[in-house]
Image (spheres, rainbow, N blue to C red):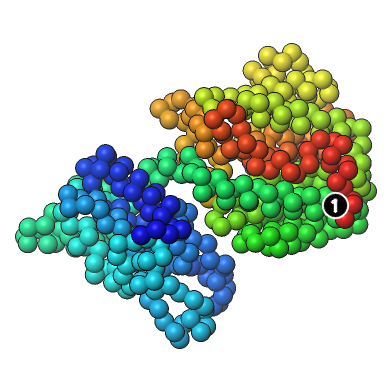
Amino acid sequence: MKNAHQVHRGRRDALIAQMRRHSGGGLAIVPTSPEVARNRDSLYPYRHDSYFYYLTGFPEPEAVVALVADGDGDRHVLFCREKDVDREIWDGFRYGPDAAKEIFAFDEAHPIAELDRLLPDLTADRPALFTPVGMHADWDRRIAATLNEVRGRARTGVVAPDEIVDVRGTLDRMRLVKDVQELALMRRAGEISSQAHLRAMARARPGWHEYEVEAELAHEFLRQGAQAVAYPSIVASGPNACVLHYRDNDRRMADGDLLLIDAGCEYRGYASDITRTFPVSGKFSGPQKAVYELVLAAQLACLDAVRPGASFHDYHKVAERVLALGLIDLGLIAGPLDAALESGSYRKFYMHRAGHWLGMDVHDAGNYQEKGESVKLEPGMVLTVEPGLYIRSGEGVPDEFADIGVRIEDDVAVTADGIENLTARAPKTVADVEAACGNG
Ligand SMILES: [Mn+2]
C-alpha cells in the first residue's frame, strides 16, 4: 500500500507508538469539525478539524478516525459518509468508505452512521481512551454515552478504559515539529501570501478604501490556489494601524497614511501570517521612517535570535530590548534602558508578544513552556517574528508620531543551523518597500 497519504498513516503510527508508551495501548478516536450554520440553510465554508486532518488528510465533514493499539496489533479505522448519488448531485463528490479506505491508507472504513453501534466494541477492554476532551459538547456526550454503554456490559465480562486521556496533548507535541510535507506546504503558503502583499503594495493608493486592498489580497490568494484566508485580513490605514485586531477595513485612505496589512492565506490546511506596513502614497515621511526603521531593526535582531537550541522566549526579550532602546532615543519613553525594561514603560507602545507557533492553525498547537521552562527551539518548528509599535495620539505623544502604527512579521522555520524565512519575498527594507509601492 503506497500512496500520497502514507504520510498521514505514518503520523497515525507515531500516535499509536505514543499510546503504547503512555498506557500500554488503547483506543484513540478523533472527530473532524461539525458543519456550522451561517443563517437559515446556508453553512459557513467548511473547515476540517486540524487534529483530525493531521492524522488523515481527509477533507469531508462527518468523519471520525479510530486507532486501535492492542496486543493483536494496530488497526487504522475511518468512519465517513456513504456514497449517495442523490446528495452528490446537490452537494458534490464524497469518497464513501470503500474508496476512502484505499486512498487514505486505512485498514477499515465504515459508514459514519455505524459509529454509535461500533464504538462500544472498539472501546471495550482497552486500558485507555485517547480523545479530545471538552472540544465539542456533542462529542463529549457521545464519549460519555459510549463509556456508560461499555460499563453496562460489565457482567458480560468486558471492562471500560481506566484512563481517559486528552489526545490533544500528544498531538500538540507532534504538531509542533513539522515534517517535510508540512514544511513544503507552509513554504507555498508563505510564497503565495508574500505575493499577495507585493500586489497590495503595488495597487494601493490614496482615495482607495481599505476593503479594495483586501480584495487585492483575496484575488492573489485564490488565484494561486489557496483555499481561504488563515484569519480575517487586517487592512488598517492611518490611526486604524494602532488597533491590533482591526477588522472593519472600510476607511478611505489618504495621502500620507501608513497602511498596515496583516494577512495570510491557508494553503491545503496550512496557515501563513505576514504583516507589512507601507506608505499609501509610496514614500515614508521622516517620523514614519524613524518608527519603521526601529521596528525593522527589532525584527532583524529577533530573526538572529531564532536558532536551534535557543529558547522560544529569547527573541521576545530581544524585541523588548531593541524597541525600548529606540523609544528612548525617539524621546517617547524615559531612559535608562534598564529602568524602562524593569518598569515596562515601553508596553504603552508595544503591547503584544513577538510571535507565536504557526502551522495548521495560525496560532498553532504546542506549548510555549514545559515544566516552567521556555521550550527550546528545534529544527522543524515554525514560528512568526512580529515586533511592532503602536503610537496612539494622546498624552506625552508628540504630534509628529501620533497615530503611527507599524508591525513587520515573517514566518520562519527553524533549521539545523538557523532559520528558513518562508516569507522573505515580501519587501521589508525602506528602499524595497518604496520601490514596490504604486507600480501596479
Ligand atoms: Mn501573527
Q: Is residue 3 left or right of residue 242?
A: left
Label 1 neighbour load within 10 Å: few <14, some 14-19, many 20+: many
- Residue under the image location 38 percent in, 76 percent down: 82
User: Which one is in front, 425 or 241?
Assistant: 425
- Residue under the image location 39 percent in, 58 percent down: 2
- Could you tell me residue 141's position as x and y percent? 32, 61
User: Which one is in front, 440 or 263?
Assistant: 440
For this orientation, the residue located farthest to the front is: 2
Answer yes or no: disc 1 within 8 Å of ligand 1: no
Residue 378 appearing in the image = yes
Image quadrant for the N terminus?
bottom left
Residue to which mark 1 is pinned: 202
Q: Is residue 419 left or right of residue 12?
A: right
For this orientation, the residue located farthest to the bottom is: 86
Answer with the quarter of the image where residue 229 lies: bottom right
User: Which one is in front, 318 or 337?
Assistant: 318
- Could you tell me residue 47's position as x and y percent? 52, 62
Answer with the quarter of the image where residue 258 lies: top right
